[in-house]
Image: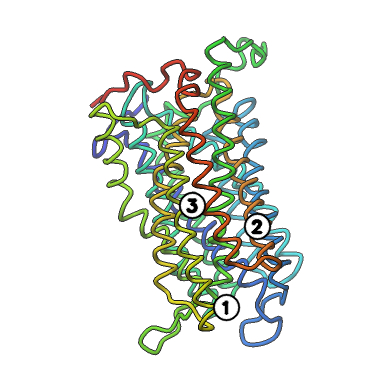
Amino acid sequence: METKSELFGHPTGLFVLFFTEMWERFSYYGMRAILVLYLVSESKGDNPGLGWSNGDALALYGWYTMSVYVASIPGGWIADRFIGQKKAVFVGGLTLCLGHSILAVEAPWAFFSGLALIVAGVGLLKPNISTMVGGLYEQKDLRRDKGFTIFYIGINIGAALAALIVGYVGEAHGWHYGFGLAGIGMLLGQIVYMMGQKHLTHVGNALASKSHGQNKIDVPLTKVEKDRVKVLFLSFAIVVVFWGAFEQAGGLMNIYTLEKTDRVIAGETIPASIFQSLNAIFIVLLGTTVAGYWAMRKSANKEASSLFKMAVGTMIMGSGFFFMSAASAEFESTGSSAIYWLVFAYLFHTVGELCASPVALSFITKLAPMKYASIMMGLYFAMTGLGSKLAGLLGESASSFGEYAVFTGIAVFCILFGLLIILFKEKLKALTHGAEDAENELV
């Protein structure tokens, strides 16, 4: 029997997925917060790392983050064709638990094996749990965007806790203790997901791609579906640019924080990984405010389309890199840079992310043909992965061009790119064939 109860004006299943994703992101961002720091730490000492160069560490970081998200393509395909989203999330969660457990072992084979399992697990879980969120809402339900923002807040509660807890444990007590703690978070997420199945009976099941044993996956798309897919592919360009800039947080900005930022407050040195929590904390604090602002604009019949939000978000996020340019200039002059430059950079990155990222997730569930829902979400995360790889390449280029040039160049490009999207948004909106028109509040 289906259970479609509501909590705080949204389907109860949203909060099951909220807490599942919160703990999954705790595991992922916990590992992300200490990965580069572990790689560049000296191979001898009280808390030995691998002793890699900054360039090699950033290269692996780029490949790893890209692989995590590119794996969403086969993860979405497996769900759409064979097992459905619900089972894909379950199997992905188990794979992640195994990967994080192996990563806690202090051995080279365990490090790379654990990373490989995490890539496979995220590939199965990430696109399918996001698609399930969209499936909780009827078409034209205005609550969908708000629901994704709530879901996004869950992601970032997990990310904030991860940077604070896993980051501290990893730096202060041992990198592998940090990796193991991340695995415990994933186990909690898996438990929440299994206990909440009664609220998810009507979403995430195998799609009707097979009927009476006949495979119907190759039924041609309609003209409207084709146009909407074109818009989705064009929107993926925004995704690559956005995350190519944003993911400097885990790479170049992380190393910059470690090596060139004055982190001493009241005589105590703040661990570099702790600053990874700023973005997540700002999201939790500002998420509903930003979502409310866009809902208010839409109610007032002002421009609030998904493409417009994504363009504005890219510009705001890019502007945050001007603060990192200022930090770089200060370091060149004085040999150190102040913490507040980082705080302002992360604040602008957060506001931009809230305008763009949860909206992009919702946008895909509005436009993607039903039979390709998960694989289109997988492609979105693959573009996120390509952006992460681009971030790694940009971070590596700082060794040749310097941080000031890289940070300033990112800021200028993001602003110009956002303006270009705004210039063509009406033509792109026409191809959506009213997918966002006449959205109404269903309560």
Q: Nearer the viewer, residue 114 or 57?
A: 57
Q: Amino acid at mark 2?
A: Leu
Q: Earlier in the sequence, mark 2 or mark 1?
A: 1
Figure quadrant of the N terminus? top left
Q: Are marks 2 and 3 in contact (CB under 8 Å)?
A: no
Q: Nearer the viewer, residue 169 or 391?
A: 391
Q: Which residue lies under the disc numbered 2?
A: 394
Q: Which one is closest to the eye, mark 2 or mark 1? A: 2
Figure quadrant of the C terminus? top left
The quadrant where residue 277 appears: bottom left
Percent position (x, y) of residue 105? 67, 69
Q: Amino acid at mark 1?
A: Glu
Mark 2 and mark 3: span between their CA atoms?
14 Å
Q: Which residue lies under the disc numbered 3?
A: 318
SS state under label 3? helix
Quick one: label 3, few (<14), some, or many (20+) residues within 10 Å?
A: many
Q: Amino acid at mark 3?
A: Gly
Give residue 350's mark: none
Q: Is residue 313 above or below residue 325?
A: above
> How many numbered circles does the render carry?
3
Mark 1 and mark 3: span between their CA atoms?
23 Å
SS state under label 1? helix
Q: Which one is closest to the eye, mark 1 or mark 3? A: 3
Q: Which residue lies under the disc numbered 1?
A: 259
At 42% from the left edge and 29% from the top edge, which residue is drawn? 201
At 52% from the left edge and 34% from the top edge, which residue is drawn? 86
Percent position (x, y) of residue 249? 53, 61
